Amino acid sequence: MKISSIFRQGGVTLLSTLALVPFVDARHEKSLPADTFVAVQVADVPLAEKQGKEHPLWKDVQKAGLDAYFAPAIKKFTEKLKADGKGGDFQKNLELLQRELTGEVLFAVVKTAKTEKGHLPYDYVWIADTSADEKTIAGLVADSGLLPEEKNEISEWAYKVIKAHQEGGPPPEPPADDAADNSSKVPVVTKNGTTDFQGVTLYERQLSFGKDDPTSLGGWALVNKTFVYASAPNVLRELVDAVQNGRKDSFGTTALWKRSRDAAGKADALAVLNAPLAVTELGKYVAERAKAGASVGVNLPVAFNALALQNLEGLWLSRELTAEEVLIKGAWSYAEKRGLLSLITYKPLETTVPDFVPAGPYMFAIAKFDTQQAWKNLELLLAQAIPFWKMQIDGKLGELKDKENIDLRAAVFENIGDDITILTNADDNSGKTGAEALRTAGKLYVLELRDSDKFTSMVETAVGKIAPGGAAALFDERDFMGVKVRTVKDTGGASISYALYGKRLLVSAGAGSLLDKVIAELKDPRNPASKDPNVRLGLKKLPREVASFTYTDLGAYAYSLFDIIDAFAKARGEELTAPGSRPKADALPWAAASYVQERDREFYGETIIFRKEDK
């Protein structure tokens, strides 16, 4: 296999994890401990690869010419592999993933039941079906560089930092100068070895610093036709025992996993996050940071508890590749809607596009919130989490009202209505590249106001207080179709504008063409997005009533990402793309329609990726 083709095959592998297969024989989760942070499952790797290569989405990705566009990046990548002597390693890694894994694959992060020296309270696990024998896998792993034997050196200060971490003590103070780089060195040695456990050969890696006893870094084993890997020796032994003899309290028996699997239905890939376990560890980290003095004047544990993240139960995401579409489903589940969750106050919304949304924006999102309740919940949360901040905010707002006659609370915070629309337009980047394209990216927020006069009065009063020269000192003003458009001056290159039309506040970040298009549609809706056949096709795939929904033209969205890639390459002084072969915005004729619903103790959502109709 030529290295130049490996990059493309890797892309096929990534896409082909979306195989058209259900979880017909899911079982590896039964080998995981119940205390599993994250589990990611792919049903069938070979079938996934086959289905991925045949899917129309992948065929259109190839037709779009992305290979030619990213040719410089691919060339640079392969040249670096050759220079580092890693070309063969990369190929062997790919073979291990792509050829030798013959069925279900499960990756997980698990809680370490018994923390050993040098190990964090969590470890990484990989379980997979394979048709290869032990000798073949041992050869692939050895060639791949997954467990290389190495000899190196580190500074004595770095060694002290590592020792403090291993022993759970405070880290040493860093040197006052560059002495750390010039101090005596401590040898670091990693080597591989084998151990027998329950009749199974464990291939383990050991790490030693100087004359310290070696620390095991875990390793892999082949149990019948199941490949297992773990980043800690005790977890590796637990996995081998679980595969051979079963595990009584496994992750597969938990309510979270069962509920996620049932809700995902027919799917080829599934990821599950055990939120209570993750929040518990996060809480420990917050407590440690507070103990170390990283509070910035805030009682971190009190603020953390006020967020009520312990009410989160889990997050799951699944993907299914159908014959013509890609379906992504997921949900956040919770026990009680308190703290941070209380800020999400959805209201029912019909999946219809307002006529002021013009045809052309590559993405628009529409949502409906109970903004007044959300504001009250935010004030309550701040009062519980950071009381003195709440007092300072109230004090500043009261001072503005009493001394400056600026009622910011009534004019803004309590004046925002329930309807929110966000639009993004690729056209605003036309003809621009790099940092200029990023600065002028067109994004427009359309907010409903309960009382536009209050907002106007507040702005004019504030302008009079801030700028003796009046609005002309702060804004460039122009008239567009009888609507006053104000653009903030001296923003460092980024363009920020706003306009009022009836009870709608339009706030533009980037070039003003999108704002102008919306004003034109508000005046006379001649070319709204609701007439676009692909928008109508996408909305037909969504439920009638949701909490929010989004439409994205994936080709135009990808086109806008090229600007970010170009800006990144320019900042690094590298050539990563071939500008002359840059695909057009319509080179990838696919779109995505998404929605979110608030159900019983969960936020549930779906994204349907579909091929657009030919013009």
Image: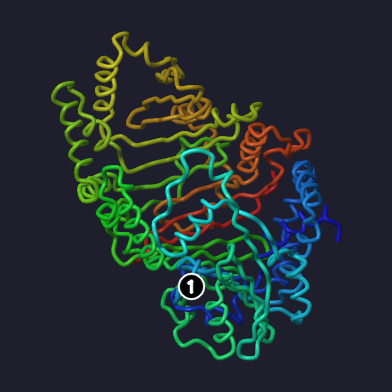
x, y percent for residue 518: 47, 30
Which residue occupies the foreground of this view, 405 or 605?
405
Left or right of residue 392, residue 292 in this image: right
The spot of residue 504 in percent (x, y) is 36, 32
> What colouring style does the render use?
rainbow
Viewer-closest of 367 and 564: 564
Q: How many marks on residues?
A: 1
Q: Position of residue 44 (x, y in %)?
A: 67, 74
Residue 200 falls in image quadrant: bottom right
Which quadrant holds residue 324?
bottom right
Q: Which residue is mark 1?
A: 116
Residue 4: image location, x then y, percent: 83, 52
- Determine the residue positioned at 44% across, 18% down: 490
Q: Give the amino acid type for the residue marked by disc 1 in the picture.
A: Glu
Toward the top, the furthest residue is 469
Query: Quadrant where the C terminus lies?
Result: top right
Identified at 33% across, 47% down, the residue is 294
Q: Is residue 58 above or below residue 275?
A: above
